[in-house]
Amino acid sequence: MNRSSVIAATALFAGLSLAPIGTHIVAPVSADEPALYGYSVESSHAERQWEEKLRAIPSPDNLRAYMQRLSARPHNVGSPYDKDNAEWIASKFKEFGLDAQIETFEVLYPTPKERAVELVDGGPKFSAKLQEPALAVDPTSDQQAEQLPTYNAYSIDGDVTAPLVYVNYGIPEDYEKLERLGVSVKGAIVIARYFHSWRGIKPKVAAEHGAIGCIIYSDPHEDGFVAGDTFPKGPYRPADGVQRGSVADMPFYPGDPLTPGIGATKNAKRLKIEDAATITKIPVLPISYADAQPLLAALGGQVAPAGWRGGLGMTYHVGPGPAKVHLKVKSNWDIKTIYDVIARIPGSTIPGEWVIRGNHHDAWVNGAEDPISGQVAMMEEARALGELLKSGWKPKRTIIYCAWDGEEPGLLGSTEWAEEHADELRAHAVAYINSDGNGRGYLGIEGSHTLEKFSNDIAREIQDPETKLSAWKRNQLNVISNASSAEDRAEARSRADLRIAALGSGSDYTAFLQHDGVASLNIGFGGEDGGGIYHSIYDDFYWYTHFSDVDFVYGRALAQTGGTAVLRLADADLLPFEFGNFADTVQTYVKELKKLSDHMQEEIRERNKEIEEGVFTATNDPRHPLVAPKTEAVPPHLNFAPLENAADALTHSATEYKKAFEQANANGGAALASASLADVNKMLIASERKLTTAEGLPNRPWFKHQLYAPGFYTGYAAKTVPAVREPMEQKQWKQAEEGIAVVARVLQDEAALISSAASKLAAAAH
Ligand SMILES: [Zn+2]
């Protein structure tokens, strides 16, 4: 997966003027050179020089050559080239001077055996092609023997025939609309378009509403000819292009469906396939818009609501029927080996603290953009670190580079590794930095807010290849340009750091952050490359080198970003966690929850009033009838005081920490170089673990983080404070109150930890 094409880059960065790339300037320590956060003046000076050296090393030519090699053939899980790539990446890491090994797991991995989508009644008989054609100009598009057929992994087997219903994006609010239209999907096959949720949400919600099958198609409105010229003339999805992808219920738990919570090693205890909760309840297949058009054209019933109409140049109807569709999905349910490449640079003085960096290497097909554009940048980072080692650099902490397998079907490689090594990670991991593909534009950084300041500091060091501004400055100006209010613009101009968004899911940070409580960041450039080749045979070297970061200068910028972040974490005297931004963020979450509560009360009160006044009967058009909504109980007032008190405690402890930091930073930060910081660093590392509970979230215990989770009904998008927000959204008020108590306790414990770290740091400064 790779959300960079789906989400707008969130942003970071302040205009340090950078030395032109490729020059090494070794200046004497200047009195006004500000020390890096967490470094004494002396160690900061040395660090800056190493970082500048590092940023001069990554080469666009290498990135291009690696991409051509890694995307030369299809390399999905279980394919010969997947294993071949893993071995090649391991050999490169070794060549760069890292200690690399391949770690394997055995995972359930279905591949298609039989697939059919047919219009059997209600229109001209039609069988979907379910095949992406090779294009003469695109040299890897004809490797049909090695290409996975178009399918959605972890769809249950099924053979169903039923009337068709169009459900727009297939998210919960679309079903509310269907209810008003008086349309039920019970016993029907639904057809949903891609976008506006992670794809696995669509069959999940359809099944909850009684549908017996689900077809997902790519409407040209989203990533086809409405958006721009189609491939090969332009970057967008051609008529027969199909988005493959996993539909396992990953917001319940990611990773191998048969081994939740434990590593899928050879002898691991496995669930039976029929007991694996993350396999879909109904069969699912993805199709192209060429295949979807005859099905949609055969729908009758009401005209689709305004926001539901796609780009196919016809009147969209909702159904049900008269189109009747036959959908058949049958898979080979095999166990396959996945190959994680794990490379280490041992720490010289604090080997027990680990800085971890990862990007997956498996793809749905050739995967030049997703994930190879990110993988090659990470490899150049590793090469750059190897070069620094040769020139005498010794990282304080241990650095681990991970090229994950099996991300596409279900975050398999990273999840199994993080489950297998959970105890070690909880003991040793400082932070995890993820990427998953790369493009042109803005530096996106999302993640743990204890690292928000750190992310901004890194973004200030990176030069944007197109504007030559720092990546931070370009992001700041972009935030100003897109702000929806004067208040937001004022904040972007005046707040020291740009805000980073919380992580939901969709890539390999999930197990680190949300299961093991390791502070995490996700990085990647994007926002300027549109396209519609995501998870198709056309995501390949030809497409990437014609329509994306064609000269690999953003690949170099990503290598500079990841490399600088890793180096700075690995070498810091005091780990660069910061709690002012963190507390500020928690305060905004609490305010949002209170607002949500007020808003829900107002909305239901207003609707009840309108029902009583007869608004819905008076405005009903008998030729286009709508079902009036039912009156609902107005939500009770929730007691947010425990959360507000906990957020205030956090703000207070963050201020204590800041004061202690300033003391330690005085006089050139001599105190920062002292050995007595070991205990403080341990507490800083523990600060993210403290945000998890052993019990995890209600109804999904695998997810342990109490601030960040993927939405149970959104999938990619984060739900912050999920144990409170999600029950509220689902109108489960008692559970919301219970959630408030749990999260308040977690935040109070966090505040106590930050206060202890502050005292220890203040003591070290004396
Ligand atoms: Zn990906």
Image (spheres, helix red, strand yellow):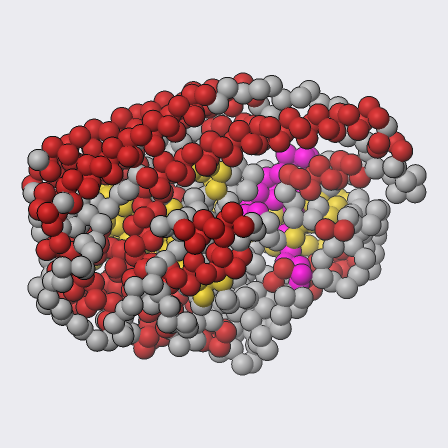
At 39% across and 44% down in the image, what residue appears? 510
Residue 623 placed where, x, y %?
92, 42
Q: Return the residue nearer the eye: 666 or 503.
A: 666
Residue 260 placed where, x, y %?
39, 35
Position above or below: 381 against 207: below
At 25% across and 59% down in the image, what residue appears? 564
Q: Return the residue nearer the eye: 106 or 284.
A: 284
Asked whether residue 496 is in view, the answer is yes
At 79% across and 61% down in the image, what residue appears? 314
Position above or below: 599 against 634: below
Q: Looking at this rendering, what residue extends furthest in the bottom direction?
A: 137
Range of magenta residues: 197-221
Is 217 included in the stretch rendered in magenta?
Answer: yes
Residue 154 is left or right of residue 675, and the answer is right
Q: Looking at this rendering, what residue extends furthest in the right direction?
A: 622
Residue 661 placed where, x, y %?
20, 40
Residue 672 placed where, x, y %?
12, 45
Asked whether residue 265 is in view, the answer is no
Q: Quadrant of the C terminus?
A: top left
Residue 533 is left or right of residue 573, and the answer is right
At 56% across and 49% down in the image, what residue appears? 485
Is 127 included in the stretch rendered in magenta?
Answer: no
Quarter where residue 595 is shown: top right
Exactly how many numbered labels are in the figure? 0
Position above or below: 602 against 163: above
Position above or below: 478 against 509: below
Q: Return the residue nearer the eye: 212 or 718.
A: 718
Quarter where residue 186 is shown: top right
